[in-house]
Amino acid sequence: MKPLPIVLALVSAVMIVALLVIKHSDNAQLETTATALTDCSNRLDSAQSQITIRDGMILTLSNRLDAAQTMAVASSNQLAEAQASVTSDAEQLAALKKQVADGQAEFVALNRSLMDLTNQTATQIAVLTNQLAQTKENLAAVNKDFALLENRFRIDVAERTLLERRFNQLPEVQAQLNKLELHPGSWSTPESIYAGLDVEVKSNGTFHVIAQN
């Protein structure tokens, strides 16, 4: 009967040792698991921190993207306005160029008209100058003729007055009658009447004073 308790004791001792070994192993595994869980928790915290940081960065990037999109829209609007302004300026420039071209064409036409008018005026001035010179010559001739006529008229008036005075006296008239009876004159004609007056008389009644030598 003594070997049974010993066997039981040995078995109990073996079981206790096995339990101790198992417990030690379990404790070691628990520690390992706890360490692994702690490490995983730390990694999870680090991952969450990184996710939070990345979320912040993504939010910042999103805000920047929104701002960039807003700036892009504003730039696009400004570009459209600039293009519209360029188009308007181009149209105004084209209109100004057309006005300048029209002004130049009008200036050329006016300059041509001015040259034509200047030439016409010069021609008219030359004609008028010639006419004025001819008029001056004619006027000088008329003045000369008038002076000759006036001088001859005064002479004729004086001679007529003298003759009238002579024929107002009877002795003078009788002497003239005696002279005509002895020396009768030829038949008087207009040419013979004006022959001694230095005046050229035409058949139509016009006359021209001949300058005395």
Image (cartoon, grey):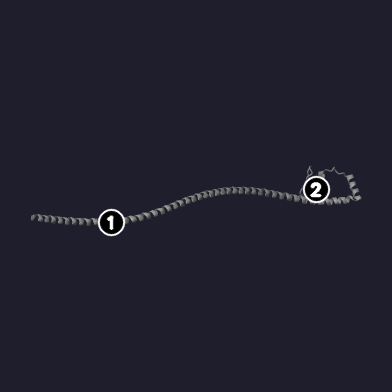
Q: Tell which of 84 and 36 is nearer to you.
A: 36
**Circle on res. 197:** 2
Q: Where the N terminus falls, by quadrant?
A: bottom left
Between disc 1 and disc 2, whose residue precedes?
A: 1
Q: Tell which of 204 and 56 is nearer to you.
A: 56
For image coordinates 43% across by 53% down, the residue present is 70
For disc 2, the neighbor class at 10 Å (few under 14, some 14 to 19, many from 20) is: some
Q: Indicate the amino acid at tag 1.
A: Ser
For image coordinates 82% across by 44% down, the residue present is 190
Q: Tell which of 14 and 12 is nearer to you.
A: 12
Query: Would residue 62 be visible to someone looking at this image?
Result: yes
For image coordinates 26% across by 55% down, the residue present is 37
Query: Would residue 213 be visible to someone looking at this image?
Result: no
Residue 89 x, y percent position in the rendering: 51, 50
Residue 150 x, y percent position in the rendering: 79, 51
Circle 1 — which element?
Answer: helix
Q: Is residue 121 left or right of residue 13?
A: right
**Badge 1 is on which residue?**
41
Q: Indicate the amino acid at tag 2.
A: Leu
Give the image quarter of residue 48: bottom left
Between the C-alphas of marks 1 and 2, the distance is 160 Å
